[in-house]
Image: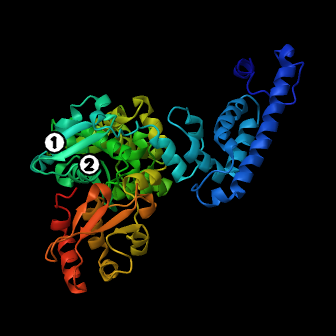
Amino acid sequence: MISEQGACRGLVSMPLNKRAFNYPLYAKEIEHLHVIFLDLLNIMEKCLGKMQDSSNLKMNGEGELNHTGWSQYLAILKELNNIAKLYKGAEENFWTVLRLGKASLCVLIVRYAKRTEDHQWLLQNKDVTDFESRRHLAMMMFPEVKEDYEELHEMLIDRSQLLSESFEYIVHADSDALHGGLFLEFKNEEATGPGVLREWFFLVTQALFDPQKALFVACPSDRRRFYPNPASKVDPMHPEYFTFSGRVMALALMHKVQVGIVFDRAFFLQLAGMHITLEDIRDADPCLYSSCKQILQMDPEFIDSDALSLTFVREVEELGSRKVVELCPGGKSIVVNSKNREKYVDLLIQHRFVTSISEPVSRFARGFADILSNSGLQKLFFQSLELEDLDWMLYGSENAICVEDWKAHTEYNGYKETDPQISWFWKIIGEMSPDQRKVLLFFWTSMKYLPVEGFRGLASRLHIYKSTEPHNHLPSSHTCFYRLCFPPYPSLAIMQDRLHLITQEHVGCSFGTW
């Protein structure tokens, strides 16, 4: 009833002007609900404040809870959000309370938000959440990866045909078959399990985003960032490969694998269904950005003199030849001047970064949506995140690998921390280059990129096992279990030699470890 009143006459103002109110019979109920809203909001503000002061919150969400009522807070806040939409000024008050209690709200989201519940209301204002809570909400849009092998989509891949065979398995699979997760084996290799799957994700994404494949273009100022190649349509297979790419990237996120690839801002905004502005193309096309900036900043008299000889057209290259495309109907005859230059720049950007790549973006989005629990959530997934959030989810930590953090998250089996072999091991790692450490990490775990939290963000701790192999044997690994094995080498020099061999890129990244 209050919703009807709001729809007809706007938000309900309090206190009520009963003479002007359409439903005088319900005035008491409307006033009473408003009082309840204010009382509950005040109580929740105090509860969030107490949470923030608690020792559990200081532990960043780790440890045992000390208040059983916390699990109900999100449900209460959701109802308060619904009521706030009915009264003038109530929404502002509601979100102000959540901003003040942001740290507590983020802990509630990570601990208590479940896939079976609707939490879209939490995505309305990103300033009340942090990266960890936004990641949690976004990840709940994916199905849960199954542990039962019978529910996994099985793939047997020949390494020499990595991309083509992976394409066949992923693109031609029913999307429901992929929702349980993946189980992978490489032909003629015994290794199976999560470590092999992590390696596959890394290899496939590196192949898909290889500039020589011409599917994606790297940003000149940041070679990690990519957007679809406008010229990709010349290959009739490329549309399906964009669907494949969307599915692979979504599956990597679902399996929580960092692949070392991130999206350009303009590409990210298109996937979110948002408008692209001049500032959004700075990384993707610095030259176009600079040119447009100059046009907008030019003296009005100079640009009105037609000294630039610009009209509403864009020159594009197709199949080796150049042609002129109108940015709007009759664009060839519309001269750019000081009054229409903003429109010209906007149309130029939209054609360059929207129209020219609309099909590959649409195909990629469709493939990505196939992996979500509900394909209709595709735009919401990207809208719920900042670009930096997605960077951290796909790329992981940009910091150099910290040896002390690595050491703190490693356990020993057969060795003791005080054994000379362990002391030598960490000394050698400490003297390695950043690239060598990455290769060793990949050999050990099938990961080149750590989560943004570092080693703390891994599913389990790392392990070093004492093996019974002769001293002339190289270390081996069981990447599924984050397990590195090596015999008790008799000297630092011998251990250094063995580790040097496995940290060569062509060795450490090509072992069939499991």
Task: Give the class, few, some or many, for how many residues have Cα within 10 Å of label 2's Cα (few <14, many ≥20).
Answer: some
Cα–Cα gap, marks 1 and 2: 12 Å
Residue 277 picture location, percent across and down: 46, 47
Label 1: which secondary element: strand
Towards the viewer: 318 or 387: 387
Return the residue at label 1: 156
**Residue shown at 40% from the left, 38% from the top:** 144
| 109 displayed left or right of 37 | left
Return the residue at label 2: 193
Question: Within the image, what quadrant is residue 324 found in?
Answer: top left
Q: Which mark is residue 305?
A: none
Q: Earlier in the sequence, mark 1 or mark 2?
A: 1
Q: What's the residue type where badge 2 is placed?
A: Gly
Towards the viewer: 285 or 47: 47
**Residue shown at 37% from the left, 34% from the top:** 369
**Residue shown at 29% from the left, 31% from the top:** 177
Residue 418 picture location, percent across and down: 38, 81
Q: What's the residue type where badge 1 is placed?
A: Leu
